[in-house]
Image: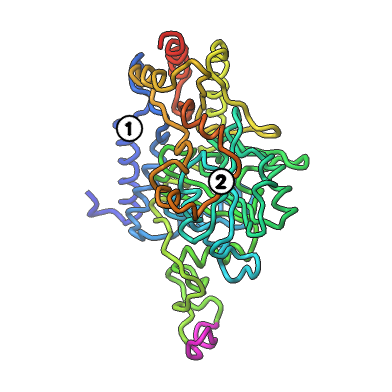
Amino acid sequence: MFENMTEQQAKEKILAMVGKYCNIYHNQNKEFKEGQRIPYASRVYDQTEMTNLVDSALEFWLTSGRYTDKFEKEFGEYLGVRFCSLVNSGSSANLLAFMTLTSPLLGDRAVQRGDEVITVAAGFPTTVTPMIQYGAIPVFVDVTIPQYNIDVNMLEEALSTRTKAVMIAHTLGNPFDLGAVKAFCDKQSLWLIEDNCDALGSVYTLNGKEKLTGTIGDIGTSSFYPPHHMTMGEGGAVYTDSPLLNKIIRSFRDWGRDCVCPSGKDNLCGHRFDRKYGELPLGYDHKYVYSHFGYNLKATDMQAAIGCAQLNKFPSFVKRRRHNFDRLRLALASIEDKVILPEPCVNSNPSWFGFLITCKEGLDRNKVVQYVENKGVQTRMLFAGNLVKHPCFDEMRKTGEGYRVVGDLTVTDQITNDTFWIGVYPGLTDEKIDYMAKTIILACKEV
């Protein structure tokens, strides 16, 4: 087939065939029938993602390359930040963001073992895991319903002489009170990491100016796992406006090295063999000088290729998520005597990841969930519920060391017992949204 073609002609033919294959065999516009499984989240894609993926595979560069450069540039431009680093997952993004705060380059502000970080227990564990791994002390405070975000009235009580940072997530797309949290961090000279993995595209108005979540704190993180707002399969990103933090982020991501030359390029600074570092001999190859204890957390160019296509669609994804959320909330208003419906944070316009529902007293969450699941509507808990009650905390609970709880986490426990959520992802049609609402209303009446 390709004997009389140039390489470029052969590639174009392959990609055209891939596009046709995707249109025929990956058609996502299938007719919906009641009772058919409706997932809480799913990939939304077309031939563009698939042809980008194959285009990258045909180049066979495999590690970070031209698609990575393109994605980091365009994603940073979308967010309005100076620096963006692509990584292999959202969990790695959180690890990298927190590691950055431990760098000796930050002087007295570096997070040391035993220093404290204010966070919440009602969320996903990988917001907290990096703190535990680095010997910092997570300080858990309660959240509020119906926003499901940090209770900012607890911040001052959580503060101690060892507090160095606040690291919390925007819950299912709903921004936490960034005005209050940012003011607190500024006043106390604390770092602020926004775990933005479930809130990409959410907007918060601060001092009269609209900004995307993830860009207001010192560092923001994103996840591109398939259920999230956009996907690369696996993947994540860390972003900041600080040149110093960006330097540290890149070092930790790229094995801990001191050199900033990209893969495949040498000696951009012109000083590869004429400097002295640590106790190494003068002129030791700078490409193998390590200023941090780092990892390889980079993504592949194939992941980035998918991300580039997804990013072009992303504004439409956000618009549809908001539409689906609003339609659900309107449809479920009739059962507010039985459930608590979610509300956006003041001064925000969320890019919703899901629709949270809390059963009021007398309504059994487990029975409601089983009813709607049996009708084909997939549900999820608010991740860990109360993370402190999970087996991973067993040893720390026995000793009473390694973490601190401020207050009694009453609302967090309420969420653990009474809250669940359903999807609003952009692949959901009005027909599916209406069926989900109808099913939940029937569940509240019949269980």
The answer to whether 418 is drawn above or below residue 441 in the figure is: below
Query: For the image shown, how many numbered marks are present on the structure?
Result: 2
Tell me if I can see residue 31 in this picture.
no
Mark 1 lies on residue: 26
Magenta span: 271-283
Residue 272 shown in magenta: yes
Neighbours of disc 2 within 10 Å: few (<14), some (14-19), many (20+):
some
Depth check: 101 or 45 in front? 101
Magenta portion: prevailing SS class: loop
Amino acid type of the residue tagged 2 in the rendering: Val
- For the point 48% across and 68% down, which residue is it? 262
- For the point 33% across and 36% down, which residue is it? 22
Quarter holding the C terminus is top left
Neighbours of disc 1 within 10 Å: few (<14), some (14-19), many (20+):
few
- Mark 1 element type: loop
Depth check: 40 or 163 in front? 163
The disc placed on residue 168 is none
Query: Which comes sooner in the sequence, label 2 or label 1?
Result: 1
**Residue with the most extreme right position:** 208
**Alpha carbon distance from label 2 to label 1:** 48 Å
Depth check: 86 or 374 in front? 374
The answer to whether 280 is drawn above or below residue 61 in the figure is: below
Mark 2 lies on residue: 405
Residue 202 shown in magenta: no
Q: Is residue 373 left or right of residue 80?
A: left
